[in-house]
Image (spheres, coloured by chain):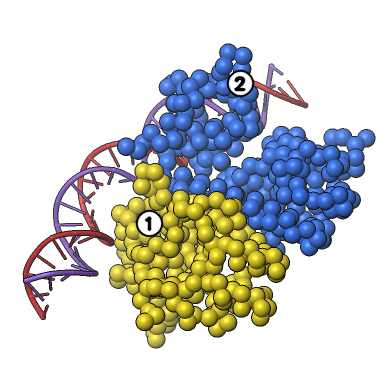
Chain colours: A blue, B yellow, C purple, D red
Amino acid sequence: MDDAQGTHPRTNCFSCRGRAQSEWCALDHGDVALLNDCKASNVYQPGQTIFTQGAACLGVFCVETGAVAIRKTDVDGNSVIVRLAHAGATLGYRAFFADAPYRASADALMPSRICFIDKVALRKLLGRNPTVGHSFLRHMARDLEEADEARLHAAALPVRARLAHLLLVLKDRFASSTHDGKLVIELPLSRQDMAAMVGTRPETIARAVRGFQDDRIARFDGRRVEVSDLERLLDELDSNEA
Amino acid sequence: MDDAQGTHPRTNCFSCRGRAQSEWCALDHGDVALLNDCKASNVYQPGQTIFTQGAACLGVFCVETGAVAIRKTDVDGNSVIVRLAHAGATLGYRAFFADAPYRASADALMPSRICFIDKVALRKLLGRNPTVGHSFLRHMARDLEEADEARLHAAALPVRARLAHLLLVLKDRFASSTHDGKLVIELPLSRQDMAAMVGTRPETIARAVRGFQDDRIARFDGRRVEVSDLERLLDELDSNEA
DNA sequence: CGGGGGTTTGAGTCCGTTCAAAATACGTGG
DNA sequence: CCACGTATTTTGAACGGACTCAAACCCCCG
């Protein structure tokens, strides 16, 4: 009885595939053992929340498999997905380093196995191995760059271009090319979530999707997208220059 | 002959007032000496650029006095100010930690004395004193939070509310209350730069400013702003809820 | 079969943009 | 100190993209 939902004692940091690309890649044997002992693993179903905006941060989370959305919500209900986290990513570290409550919520987009790492254990690791801190600095630098980039995009590009950009990002992780050479993306997001990613309303996403179909750039069937012409999709990003 | 523009050998990290609030606050005497030896000080006039988007990062910068805008620019000329840096702030650290070229430019908003700290020296400091790394983690966590917050704002709030928010932020650093109790802000930004901060066009800023004047919330005279009713300005932030 | 959420579509409106011109501020040289 | 040229800011009018509100549709699930 270790499946479904509750704590899952059998997961093992040594064999965790995501670790290689994560901040934990430079740990020695003893460090991994420490990590392995203090973590708690959990499986989250789509929609389940991992942590909530406003709550105190008790540690960080580690995505072993699956995908997670980090959302920021307004007093009047407006919300935006500020980033996605995939296998290997560490979650909730911003609040940890700021030593402040979470300023965003995280929920699973698909069934996801996620480990929790306690504050004190993490602090111990940071003390033992300086590379861990460096990895976080690098990781955070990337996230910050992406956030800034998103701001520029939101201000400069129309929804259609932003959606194209989103598809191109999702392609890298969720694309599977078919037999006849066509690119197929299995979206991990609902239309609502796509809207939240792009910073707009679901209705507008629907229209933009329609636009892409009418222009024969891609075919949408639920969460399945067939990109017929990748070039044209790339063109959308800067077609309004010149 | 040490004024105006060129390298300025006389500045001293020991006496630098900004240091207390910066990442360098926990350095011991030896560390500060190291910092002091390897840095190069410089005075930048308004409009002068400190570093340029796309260029390689050779180290970080330290604002001793003045204020700096960090801008991100598009291939087709759109640009946004992603953050401001004041006395005590460290500049260009994102590129340093990502070990990548600058993804934004920095230019002075007012006459500013800014020190440059070499890559190798910084690396040495990070090695010697782990608190430095922690400080950067904290600083970056704050910047990331602000970037995310800005994204939500841009998506959810109209220009008028975003401008109100900008004024409230600038107030904290550039306000001087007058004899008769009125709040006065001396803006460090041109209208164009305000537009770039809020993510809109100068024309729209002009209209929003007009709006505030018509509603008797504040009086604008060039870069001088008199806020007659701070309450009403605060209300602008969430007046469209309920 | 009958909800109920999510998605799509439509019509109307509003906010912000665009383009163009007038007004103002600013630095420079006469 | 004033005159002038240039850049910034302001204003106006028209346009357009995205939002709102509302209804229809769809799909999944009980």
Q: Is residue B21 visible?
A: no
- Asked if residue B24 lies left or right of residue A218, the reply is right
Q: CA distance from mark 2 to mark 1?
A: 43 Å
Could you tell me which secondary element the residue under label 2 belongs to?
A: strand
For residue B195, the mark is 1
Between B165 and B213, the one nearer to me in the picture = B165
Between D27 and A53, the one nearer to me in the picture = A53
In terms of image quadrants, where is residue A94? bottom right
Where residue A147 appears, as percent x and y from the top left, is: 55, 49
- Quadrant that contains the N terminus of chain A: top right
Q: Which amino acid, mark 1? A: Ala
- Asked if residue A72 lies left or right of residue B200, the reply is right
Give the chain letter at badge 1.
B
Say whether marks 2 and 1 touch (CB < 8 Å): no
As displayed, is residue A202 above or below residue B67? above
In terms of image quadrants, where is residue B218? bottom left
Q: Callout 1 environment at 10 Å: few (<14), some (14 to 19), or many (20+)?
A: many
As displayed, is residue A27 above or below residue A101? above
Where residue B210 appears, as percent x and y from the top left, is: 31, 61
Query: Which label lies toward us, 2 or 1?
Result: 2
